[in-house]
Amino acid sequence: MSTGLVIAIVVAAVIVLMALVVMGRRARAGRELKRERLGERVGGHRQEAEAHSSKAGELTVEREARSAEAAEEAREADHHAQLAEEHRQRAEEIEAESEEVGERVEREDRMSRRHEEQAGDLEEKL
């Protein structure tokens, strides 16, 4: 082999090695860039997860407050229903008493008319 050929082969090998090194560096830089972008996405997702977790905590407090309020309203409604039933029963009792008094009024009116007639009859006899 001639010296020129050996030099050409060595130069070609050096060029190939340099190209491989450059390609390796580019590949590594690409992987690092991809890893950095994925890291940013991971950070974004974690931040979103934290925000949603915080919102869920706030909504849990609100849900508990509304549940307590609903339970209180239900108790209040039960109380009002009981009062309404008591008033309904009392109204029925008063209505029955009113009917009894009405019957007594009619009876008293009849007796008044009868006594008025008797007084009239007695006056005629005088």
Image (cartoon, grey):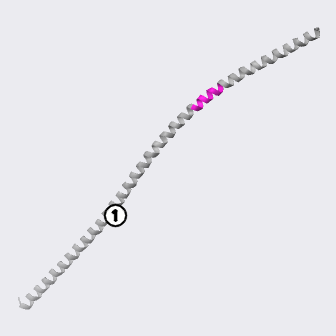
Percent coordinates x, y for residue 106 in the rendering: 78, 19
Taking the spot 48% from the left edge, 39% from the top edge, the residue there is 71
Percent coordinates x, y for residue 96 in the rendering: 68, 22
SS class, disc 1 = helix
Judged from this view, the residue extending furthest toward the top is: 125
Q: Main secondary structure of the magenta part?
A: helix
Taking the spot 25% from the left edge, 73% from the top edge, the residue there is 30
Q: Is residue 57 left or right of residue 16?
A: right
Taking the spot 13% from the left edge, 83% from the top edge, the residue there is 14
Q: Does 35 sit above or below residue 21?
A: above
Quadrant of the rendered structure where residue 21 is?
Answer: bottom left
Q: Is residue 36 left or right of residue 104?
A: left
Closest to the observer, 68 or 37: 68
Residue count near mark 1 (Cα–Cα under 10 Å), binned few <14, some 14–19, many ≥20? few
Percent coordinates x, y for residue 8 in the rendering: 11, 88
Magenta-colored stretch includes residue 22: no
Q: Does 65 sit above or below residue 79?
A: below
- Quadrant of the rendering where the C terminus is positioned: top right
- Disc 1 designates what residue? 44
Name the kind of residue labelled 1 in the image. Gly
Please report the bounds of the magenta region as a residue range. 83-92
Q: Is residue 48 left or right of residue 70?
A: left
Closest to the observer, 25 or 41: 41
Judged from this view, the residue extending furthest toward the front is: 126
Q: Does 18 sit above or below residue 51?
A: below
Quadrant of the rendered structure where residue 80 is?
Answer: top right
Quadrant of the rendered structure where residue 81 is?
Answer: top right
Percent coordinates x, y for residue 66 in the rendering: 47, 45
Magenta-colored stretch includes residue 85: yes
